[in-house]
Image (tube, rainbow, N blue to C red):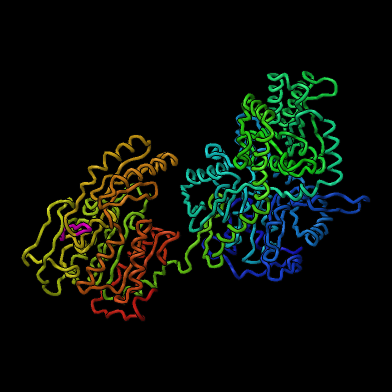
């Protein structure tokens, strides 16, 4: 088979060292290539989809059974109906989707047979095998998956330095390499934008990143069939961020229970600072412009498969078992020989029942069906020996005649025999100490329902289920037990066997209604429906891949019109404009957010002075900082950085200003209103101030626009333009102080116009709980005050109604228009959420029929924004503004011609 080797080389570089060159298609800072040529492999040319999209199931093992022919001349294959993804096909609408499978085989295929086997599997089963080789497969599956990842997901920490579960970098590389080989195979298979890929379980957790790096708009989901541990466990894993970010590269991630989903969300919050939102029953995480769905949906089984198997063989075996255990109460257990299945705890609980209730000796039997372990280790060997010793001890203690209290079955059990065993058992016991789902209770309920010789009114079943398995929440009629407490399990078993038939019938009926409706097909339909809904707009997404390593790679999804600001285009427009408005954020725009010293340096001051020196410019710094800080930093009485700016002819007034009357607040913002009653001394307009320092013409907006000063010679005014009633602060401060004291890591920021409670350094979960409680408290108390209580990124803020940077921009634009200085050029730059209000205000300017203005709204950093442009960082901003400040002052420029109705966007 041919393959697109150019794509593989880059993925290989990612797998082998996570460095090197960017991908030639869909690499960092490039668009995903929607014009990609179809796959060239020969199989792809035969698929004959007839316009159907493909639904590709990806799992560690293909849902087929493999065996050699009788004469050992070839391989023979058959569907594995026990495989969940084989049962899942019933939930796919085959008129809309062609179903394909990608995975490994359970046996090793010699290299000279691989091509023929691949062709046979494709033509007969729509399967694409991944051939890992025996050495890589052992290190990937038996080494990393089973000895390191599986224990961690089940809360097992390798405390001993000699433990096989200790992290091994070589095994990690084998895991990544195996995942990379899966991605290579999928690159051969995926050839359409509307293909869906559904990845299953923990064996392929880095596959989403490898695929997303190649296909930016891939429609991809992942379902984790194992538990997801709490953040305290997950944080111990050395490659925690690589796996977590890879999970966030899917569109929909599914878990069996809310507990597992809650642990995942907690990890995202604590390690990556990502918060989730709920909307109409869905849980969403916003991750670099992409909405990732989190779905809680336990899997099911296919009831018809068990009900239809009540044939002659099954009924004969059932009758044989009924005769064998006549007059006895049968408990059934079906488990893998695994550390987390709790088989030894189950046996000890049965022993405890027989110890405490001698009347059940000779009557109570446990049939324990034990499947072979899926991996070998010293721990498994020790567990096996211990379990056998417990079973022997119980049998020696309580057996008499033909009666054995524990019937140990450790051999392959056919489907017919398993159904027969389930159908004769009075109680199913599951004592796993940690398990993802465990479908044994579902299978047991179906088989008890399907027994043909029991009338409907007498059909009954009982379940004793560990509270640590995924099926436990959905089986509300089961007796839930703590498997670590042997007495609790023994009491649960005793309660189950003593329960009256009527109660057992009612519980069985309730469980049967659930199991018969929440089938594997129902699970698939629900997951597919959500994946289709979440990926509906993928074809219109503009995506960038950032980062090379698994710990940094992510896809940034941006608006269709979002692009990097072109300095040449902006400077040409700037030079043609006659009146320009520059609206600049401070932190994260003019100075770096991470800078230790937040004061403007000499370069920033020189740049701002140069911009203000041009009489065609109106420059405003709009910040969340206090007005005292801004006034001090941009004090025009300070020495001018560039003395030549003082002699600028442009600073001289053009004509005498008219009489002026205004009102403003005193410095505190809450004092007595001041009135200028006479035209002497006159208050110049914004375009006519004369000053020795260009900073005299600089406008400042403090505390996110609540306080505004148009020029240095003018007084600060608040958003209402009059007396500011801030008496509510006296009520709120004591409450915030209480929350600050009781929440370690939080602090209170007291501003003139607002109060902000920060909890970013507190425990994330506790901080959110406290924030929610505080929000409810304040909203109720301040319901009659002219304030708003908002929750932001790890903050709760109380501020006057209407205070925002967007409102400040509206006031500035209105004042300029009233003075006849409506700008024909606006440059608005900001970097955080508060600046989005400015960008929204720019959108309103865009569609205003009264202004013919060229608007450049620009965010700092490539991230989702209302702004149509971006710049990479503060260095880019400084470079651009410096070039603008050095442009010659042209006083004889003409008005910018309108381009149609309203403003023309560049």
At 25% from the left edge and 67% from the top edge, which residue is drawn?
Answer: 618
When the figure is inspected, residue 352 is found, relative to residue 409, above or below; the finding is above
Secondary structure mostly taken by the magenta-highlighted segment of the chain: loop
Q: Is residue 439 left or right of residue 735?
A: right
Occupied quadrant, residue 631: bottom left
The residue depicted at 42 percent of the width and 63 percent of the height is 870
From the top left corner, tell me how far across and down residue 473 is, in percent: 59, 40
Rendered position, 423 above or below 252: above
Q: Nearer the viewer, residue 250 or 319?
A: 319
Answer whether residue 389 is magenta in the image: no
**Which picture quadrant has residue 153?**
top right
x and y, in percent, of residue 211 in the image? 62, 57
User: Would residue 527 appear left or right of 661 to someone viewing this image?
Assistant: right
Asked if residue 142 shows in the view, the reply is: no
Task: Classify the position of the N terminus by image quarter.
Answer: bottom right
Residue 330 point in image, percent of width and height:
76, 31
In the rendered image, the residue lying farthest to the right is 71
Residue 714 in magenta stretch: yes
Quadrant containing the C terminus in the rendered view = bottom left
Residue bounds of the magenta highlight: 713-720
Q: In front: 72, or 198?
A: 198
> Depth check: 491 or 871 in front?
491
Q: Is residue 158 above or below residue 826?
A: above
Asked if one can make out residue 509 in the rendered structure from this viewpoint, the answer is: yes
In the shown orientation, is residue 312 left or right of residue 505? right
Classify residue 729 as left or right of residue 347: left
Q: Position of residue 535 (x, y in %)?
A: 56, 61
């Amino acid at each position: 088979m041919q393959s697109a080797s150019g794509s593989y080389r880059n993925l290989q570089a990612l797998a082998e060292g996570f460095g090197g060159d960017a991908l030639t298609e869909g690499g960092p800072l490039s668009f995903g290539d929607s014009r990609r040529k179809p796959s060239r492999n020969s199989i792809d040319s035969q698929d004959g989809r007839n316009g159907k999209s493909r639904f590709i199931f990806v799992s560690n093992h293909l849902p087929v059974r493999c065996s050699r022919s009788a004469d050992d001349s070839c391989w023979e294959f058959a569907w594995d109906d026990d495989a969940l993804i084989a049962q899942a096909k019933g939930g796919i609408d085959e008129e809309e989707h062609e179903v394909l499978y990608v995975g490994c085989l359970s046996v090793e295929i010699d290299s000279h047979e691989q091509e023929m086997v691949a062709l046979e599997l494709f033509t007969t089963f729509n399967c694409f095998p991944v051939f890992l080789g025996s050495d890589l497969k052992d290190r990937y599956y038996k080494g990393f998956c089973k000895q390191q990842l599986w224990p961690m997901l089940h809360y097992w920490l390798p405390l001993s330095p000699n433990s096989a579960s200790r992290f091994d970098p070589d095994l990690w590389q084998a895991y990544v390499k195996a995942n990379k080989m899966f991605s290579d195979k999928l690159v051969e298979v995926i050839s359409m934008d509307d293909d869906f890929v559904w990845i299953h379980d923990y064996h392929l957790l880095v596959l989403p990143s490898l695929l997303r790096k190649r296909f930016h708009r891939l429609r991809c989901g992942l379902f984790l069939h194992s538990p997801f541990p709490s953040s305290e466990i997950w944080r111990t894993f050395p490659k925690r961020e690589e796996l977590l970010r890879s999970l966030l590269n899917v569109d929909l991630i599914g878990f069996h229970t809310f507990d597992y989903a809650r642990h995942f969300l907690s990890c995202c919050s604590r390690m990556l600072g990502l918060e989730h939102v709920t909307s109409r029953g869905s849980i969403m995480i916003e991750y670099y412009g992409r909405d990732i769905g989190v779905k809680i949906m336990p899997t099911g089984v296919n009831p018809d498969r068990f009900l239809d198997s009540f044939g002659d063989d099954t009924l004969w075996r059932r009758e044989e078992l009924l005769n064998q255990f006549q007059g006895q109460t049968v408990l059934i257990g079906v488990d893998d020989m695994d550390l987390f299945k709790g088989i030894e705890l189950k046996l000890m609980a049965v022993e405890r029942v027989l110890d405490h209730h001698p009347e059940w000796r000779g009557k109570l039997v446990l049939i324990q069906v034990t499947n072979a372990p899926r991996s070998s280790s010293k721990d498994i060997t020790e567990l096996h020996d211990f379990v056998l010793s417990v079973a022997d001890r119980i049998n020696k203690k309580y057996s008499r005649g033909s009666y054995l209290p524990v019937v140990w079955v450790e051999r392959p059990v056919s489907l017919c025999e398993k159904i027969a065993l389930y159908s004769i058992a009075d109680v199913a016991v599951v004592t796993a100490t940690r398990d993802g789902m465990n479908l044994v209770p579902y299978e047991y309920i179906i088989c008890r329902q399907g027994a043909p010789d029991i009338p409907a009114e007498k059909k009954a079943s009982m379940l004793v289920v560990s509270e640590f398995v995924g099926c436990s929440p959905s089986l509300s009629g089961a007796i839930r037990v703590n498997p670590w407490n042997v007495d609790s399990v023994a009491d649960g078993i005793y309660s189950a066997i003593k329960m009256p038939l009527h109660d057992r019938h009612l519980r069985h009926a309730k469980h049967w209604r659930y199991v018969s409706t929440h089938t594997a097909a129902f699970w698939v339909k629900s997951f597919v429906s959500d994946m289709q809904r979440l990926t509906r707009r993928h074809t219109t997404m503009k995506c960038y891949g950032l980062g090379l390593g698994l710990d940094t790679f992510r896809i940034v999804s941006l608006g269709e019109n979002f692009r990097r600001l072109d300095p040449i285009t902006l400077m040409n427009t700037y030079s043609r404009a006659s009146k320009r408005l520059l609206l600049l954020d401070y932190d994260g725009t003019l100075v770096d957010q991470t800078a230790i010293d937040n004061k403007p340096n000499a370069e920033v001051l020189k740049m701002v002075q140069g911009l203000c020196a041009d009489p065609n410019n109106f420059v405003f710094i709009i910040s969340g900082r206090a007005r005292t800080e801004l006034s001090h930093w941009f004090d025009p009485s300070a020495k001018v950085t560039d003395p030549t700016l003082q002699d600028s002819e442009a600073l001289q007034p053009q004509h005498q200003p008219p009489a002026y009357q205004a009102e403003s607040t005193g410095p505190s913002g809450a004092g007595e209103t001041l009135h200028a009653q006479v035209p002497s001394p006159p208050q110049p307009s914004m375009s006519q101030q004369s000053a020795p320092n260009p900073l005299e013409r600089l406008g400042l907006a403090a505390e996110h626009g609540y306080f505004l000063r148009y020029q240095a010679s003018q007084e600060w005014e608040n958003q209402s333009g009059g007396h500011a009633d801030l008496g509510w602060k006296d009520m709120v401060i004591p409450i915030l102080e209480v929350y600050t004291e009781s929440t370690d890591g939080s602090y209170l920021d007291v501003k003139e116009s607002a109060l902000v409670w920060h909890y970013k350094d507190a425990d994330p979960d506790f901080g959110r709980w406290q924030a929610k409680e505080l929000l409810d408290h304040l909203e109720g108390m301040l319901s009659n005050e002219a304030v708003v209580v908002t929750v932001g990124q790890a903050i709760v803020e109380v501020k006057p109604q209407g205070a925002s940077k967007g409102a400040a921009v509206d006031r500035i634009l209105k004042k300029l228009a009233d003075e006849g200085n409506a700008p024909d050029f606006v440059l608005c730059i900001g970097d955080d959420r508060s600046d989005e209000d400015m960008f929204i205000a720019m959108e309103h300017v865009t569609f205003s029929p009264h202004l013919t203005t060229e608007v450049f709204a620009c965010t700092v950093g490539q991230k989702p924004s209302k702004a149509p442009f971006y710049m990479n960082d503060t260095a880019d901003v400084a470079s651009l503004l410096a070039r603008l400040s050095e442009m010659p002052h042209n006083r004889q420029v003409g008005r910018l011609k309108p381009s149609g109705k309203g403003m023309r966007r560049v």
